Image: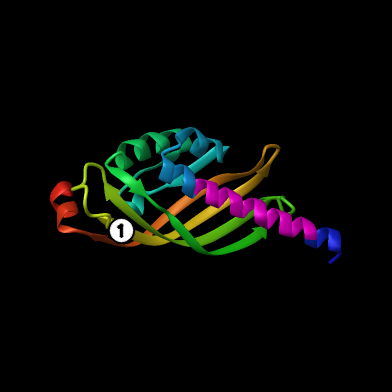
Amino acid sequence: MTQRVELATVMDRLAVDEVVTQYAVAVDDGDWAAYRGLFAADGRADYRSAGGIEGDAEQICGWLAESLALFAMRQHLIVNRRTRFGVLEHDTGDSAQVQADYINPMRFAGGDGVSTAPDFVCGGRYSFALLRTRDGWRLRRVVVEEKWRKMTERTAALTD
């Protein structure tokens, strides 16, 4: 490989990693305009394994905004990112797949004012499919595979 090709690959890795980071920040901050902006025109997300829905970015924004309004604090930690660039149909490297593990502690709004511990924590794996567009790397598909969740007694009472 030439140095130029290697540099381009490094730059793509950084750009793809930035999209994943922006995804976590947008969800945690409830910035739904930023969330929508991360998706390609035909982008979709699937949160069914976490009790959610599957749909386009607009549908997902509505569901996330409603579901996450219960939580005053959200903090996605996305780790162990594995990125692979590949061929999508007749593409020559303008697609990427990222698998990454996550842990997501959340705290209910209107808590007791004393405790700062999360009321709800879940973890699992994301699968991100990205596509290089004229506007940069964008999400084509996000699939959440929730593997576990832990709720406090307070959480269980509110969700029953």
Q: Is residue 76 left or right of residue 14?
A: left
| Quarter holding residue 64 | top left
Q: Give the residue number, with chain letter if any, for mark 1.
A: 121
Q: What SS does tag 1 mark?
A: strand
Q: Is residue 26 visible?
A: yes
Q: Is residue 145 left or right of residue 119?
A: right
Secondary structure that dominates the magenta span: helix
Establish if 104 lies above or below 158.
below
Q: Which residue: 63% across, 55% down?
A: 96
Q: Position of residue 7 (x, y in %)?
A: 79, 59
Which region of the structure is painted magenta? 7-23
Magenta highlight on residue 96: no
In the picture as drawn, the residue positioned furthest to the front comes out as 114
Q: Is residue 89 left or right of residue 24?
A: right
Q: Which residue: 15% across, 57% down?
A: 153
Quarter that holds the N terminus:
bottom right
Q: Which residue: 40% across, 58% down?
A: 145
The structure's colour scheme is: rainbow
Q: Is residue 87 visible?
A: no
Binning the other alpha carbons within 10 Å of mark 1 as few (below 14), some (14 to 19) or many (20 upward) gives: some
Magenta highlight on residue 20: yes
Camera-side residue: 143 or 8?
Answer: 8
Q: Position of residue 101 (x, y in %)?
A: 46, 63
Q: Position of residue 62 (x, y in %)?
A: 37, 34
Amino acid at circle 1: Val
Q: Position of residue 117 (x, y in %)?
A: 27, 57
- Number of callouts in the render? 1
Q: Which residue: 41% across, 39% down?
A: 30
